[in-house]
Image: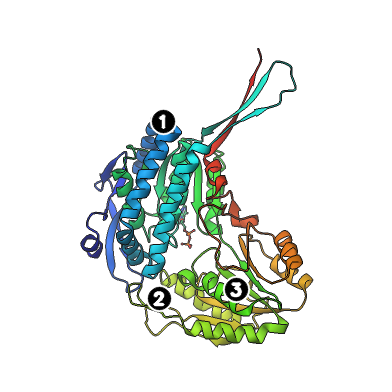
C-alpha cells in the first residue's frame, strides 16, 4: 500500500490503546481512499464498543498519574512532541495530502500550525493560575483552584485531519487531562501518525488513546460513558446537536466547533484588489471546505460589477488537480457525497435566478474535482444563503445600505466567522460590534492562529480553541472557603 511505502515509519493501520498498537481487536476493517483518484491507501480497524471501553479505561487509569505531574513536566512532554512533529513535517504533509486531497503546500502549512498548537499549549501549561478572592468574612480565605476535567474524548473532522487533533489534544494534555481520540474515518492516518510521534516524544501509555471505526457507534459509546467527563467535537451542526443530546444524560462538558455561514462583506470604500485576495483565501482554501470559508459574499451595489470582474480574473488563475502536482491550488472534494451536495446547491441557486460567472460544473479532471465557481445575483431564498456550501463556490449578493446588510448578515442560525472590507474606521467599529459571530476579520481573509480564541456563537458552537482561552476548556474551577 502506498502510505506504507511513502512513510514507512509513520504509517500505522492499528489503534493506539493504553500505549499499545492493536489491530486484532478490530473485527472488521474500513478502507481509506485518496480523494484525488479513489485509490485505496490503507485500512483501519473498525472498533466495537468493548474496545472503545478499553480505551476509556486506559485513559481513566492514566489520568490518576498524569494529573499529578507538574505543569513543567507536561510542558516538556508537549515540547518533545512539537519537535517530533516538526522533524517529520514533510512526511506528515504527505500523509495528509494523500488522505485528504489538499495541495502539498497547504498540507505543509497545516502541519506547521499543528505543531504550533502543541508548542503554544506547552507554554500555556505553566500559565494556569487560580484566584484569591477578597473575603466578605474576616479572617477567611476564598480560593479558586483549577483542576483538569478528567478523561476527555475528542472527535475530529476530515477537513483539517492534523491541526484539529493537536488543537484539542495539546490543551487537554497541558491541563492534565487524558484523551480518547476518534479521528474522522475518511482521514485517520494523520491522527495515527501524530500518535506515533507522541509515543516517540514519551507521552505515557493511556494519556492519548486513538480509536478508529464507524463514527456513530463509537460516538455513542464515548457520549454514554460516565467516565468521560468532556467531549470536544469539530464537525457539522447536525452531528454536534446529536452529540449534545447524547451527552445530556451524563451532563458532560462540551466544546463544539460546528458549521458556519460566514458573510464576506465588501463596502464601496474597500480596496477592491485586497478584498479579492482576501476572498480567494477565505473562499477557496482547502477547496472551500473549511468552517470559516466565506459562504455569502455581500458586495455594495456601487462596486458590484467591478468586484465581480476582478474576482473572475483571480479565479481564472486557480489550478485544479492532484495535491502533489506543481502549482496546484485546488484539490478534490472529500467524496462523491460532497460533490453531489455542491452540485445541488449550484443548481438550486441557478433555479432561483442566479447567474454563472465562472465554473458551475464538475471539473474535467473527473472524480470529485469541481470547477472554481462564481455565481452572481444570488437570491436570499437560495439554499446556499442559509446552508454551508463546503465547496469552491462563491455566491455574490448585492446590498445598498448598511441597515439592509446587517439584517441579511445576521439572518442565520450560524455565527462563526465574518469578514469585512472597508477603509472607514467608524464602519469597522459598527460591524465588529453588530455582527453576531465569534470571530471578525477586518481587511483580512485569514485569521486562524494558535494565539487567538477560535469559536462560534449561536448554532456554530460552544467554547474556544487556541489562545489563552483554549486550555480553560479542559479545566474545572473548584472554590475553596477556608475559615481559621
Ligand atoms: P461531515 O458531514 O462534514 O463529514 P461530520 O460532522 O459528519 O461532518 O463529521 C465530523 C466528525 O464527526 C467525524 O469524525 C465523523 O466521523 C464524526 N461523526 C459523524 N457522525 C457521528 C455521530 N453520529 N456521532 C459521533 N461522531 C460522528
> Which mark is in front, 3 or 1?
1
**Residue 368: % across, % down:** 40, 75
Question: Residue at point 54% right, 40% down?
Answer: 252
Q: CA distance from mark 2 to mark 1?
A: 47 Å
Q: How many numbered discs? A: 3
**Residue 70: % across, % down:** 43, 31
Q: Are discs 3 and 1 less than 8 Å apart at CB?
A: no
Foreground pick, 218 / 110: 110
Q: Seen in the image, is 360 located left or right of residue 297? A: left
Give the number of the disc on residue 457: none
What residue is disc 1 on?
69
Question: Residue at point 44% right, 63% down?
Answer: 159
What residue is disc 2 on?
368
User: Residue 100 is drawn in which quadrant?
Assistant: bottom left
Q: Hey, which residue is sitting farthest top in the picture?
A: 484
Q: Earlier in the sequence, mark 2 or mark 1?
A: 1
Crowd tier of the residue under label 3, counting other residues whose Cα lies within 10 Å: few below 14, some 14–19, many 20 or above: many
Q: Seen in the image, is 369 located left or right of residue 229? A: left
Q: CA distance from mark 3 to mark 1?
A: 49 Å
Q: Earlier in the sequence, mark 3 or mark 1?
A: 1
Q: Identify the coloring.
A: rainbow
What residue is disc 3 on?
384
Q: Is residue 255 above or below residue 435?
A: above
Q: Are discs 2 and 1 less than 8 Å apart at CB?
A: no
Whether the residue carrying mark 3 lies under 8 Å from ligand 1 is answered with: no
Image quarter where the N terminus lies is: bottom left
Question: Residue at point 25% right, 62% down?
Answer: 3
Task: Specify whether residue 176 is in view.
Answer: yes
Q: Earlier in the sequence, mark 3 or mark 2?
A: 2
Q: Is residue 11 above or below residue 125?
A: below
Q: Is residue 89 above or below residue 124?
A: below
Amino acid at each position: 500500500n502506498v502510505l506504507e511505502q511513502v512513510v514507512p515509519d509513520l504509517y500505522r493501520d492499528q489503534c493506539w490503546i493504553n500505549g499499545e498498537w492493536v489491530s486484532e481487536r478490530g473485527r472488521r476493517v474500513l478502507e481509506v481512499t485518496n480523494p484525488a483518484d479513489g485509490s485505496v491507501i490503507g485500512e483501519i480497524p473498525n472498533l466495537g464498543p468493548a474496545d472503545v471501553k478499553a480505551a476509556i479505561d486506559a485513559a481513566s487509569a492514566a489520568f490518576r498519574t498524569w494529573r499529578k505531574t507538574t505543569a513543567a513536566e507536561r510542558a516538556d512532554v508537549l515540547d518533545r512532541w512539537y519537535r517530533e512533529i516538526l522533524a517529520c513535517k514533510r512526511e506528515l504533509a504527505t500523509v495528509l495530502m494523500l488522505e485528504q486531497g489538499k495541495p502539498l503546500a497547504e498540507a505543509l502549512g497545516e502541519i506547521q500550525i499543528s505543531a504550533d498548537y502543541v508548542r503554544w499549549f506547552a507554554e500555556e501549561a505553566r500559565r494556569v493560575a487560580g484566584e484569591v478572592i477578597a473575603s466578605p468574612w474576616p479572617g477567611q480565605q476564598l480560593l479558586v483552584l483549577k483542576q483538569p476535567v478528567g478523561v476527555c474524548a475528542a472527535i475530529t473532522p476530515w477537513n483539517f485531519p492534523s491541526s484539529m487533533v493537536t488543537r484539542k489534544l495539546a490543551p487537554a494534555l497541558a491541563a492534565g487531562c487524558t484523551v480518547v481520540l476518534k479521528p474522522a474515518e475518511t482521514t485517520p492516518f494523520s491522527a495515527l501518525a501524530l500518535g506515533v510521534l507522541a509515543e516517540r516524544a514519551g507521552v505515557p501509555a493511556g494519556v492519548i488513546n486513538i480509536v478508529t471505526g464507524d463514527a456513530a457507534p463509537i460516538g455513542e459509546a464515548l457520549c454514554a460513558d460516565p467516565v468521560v467527563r468532556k467531549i470536544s467535537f469539530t464537525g457539522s451542526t447536525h452531528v454536534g446537536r446529536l452529540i449534545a443530546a447524547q451527552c445530556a444524560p451524563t451532563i458532560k462538558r462540551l466544546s463544539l466547533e460546528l458549521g458556519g455561514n460566514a458573510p464576506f462583506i465588501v463596502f464601496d470604500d474597500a480596496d477592491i484588489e485586497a478584498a479579492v485576495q482576501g476572498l480567494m483565501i477565505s473562499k477557496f482554501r482547502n477547496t472551500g471546505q473549511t468552517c470559516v470559508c466565506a459562504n455569502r459574499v455581500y458586495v455594495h451595489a456601487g462596486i458590484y460589477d467591478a468586484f465581480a470582474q476582478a474576482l473572475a480574473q483571480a479565479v481564472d488563475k486557480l489550478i485544479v488537480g492532484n495535491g502533489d502536482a506543481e502549482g496546484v491550488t485546488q484539490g478534490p472534494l472529500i467524496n462523491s457525497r460532497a460533490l453531489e451536495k455542491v452540485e445541488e446547491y449550484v443548481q438550486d441557486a441557478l433555479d432561483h435566478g442566479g447567474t454563472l460567472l465562472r465554473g458551475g460544473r464538475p471539473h474535467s479532471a473527473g472524480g470529485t474535482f469541481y470547477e472554481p465557481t462564481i455565481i452572481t445575483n444570488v437570491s436570499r431564498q437560495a439554499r446556499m444563503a442559509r446552508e454551508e456550501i463546503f465547496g469552491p463556490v462563491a455566491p455574490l449578493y448585492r446590498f445598498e445600505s448598511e441597515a439592509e446588510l446587517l439584517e441579511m448578515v445576521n439572518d442565520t442560525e450560524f455565527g462563526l466567522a465574518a469578514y469585512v472590507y472597508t477603509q472607514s474606521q467608524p464602519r469597522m467599529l459598527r460591524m465588529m460590534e453588530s455582527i453576531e459571530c465569534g470571530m471578525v476579520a477586518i481587511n483580512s481573509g485569514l485569521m486562524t492562529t494558535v494565539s487567538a480564541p477560535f469559536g462560534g456563537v449561536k448554532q456554530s458552537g460552544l467554547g474556544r480553541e487556541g489562545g489563552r482561552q483554549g486550555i480553560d476548556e479542559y479545566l474545572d474551577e473548584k472554590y475553596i472557603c477556608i475559615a481559621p
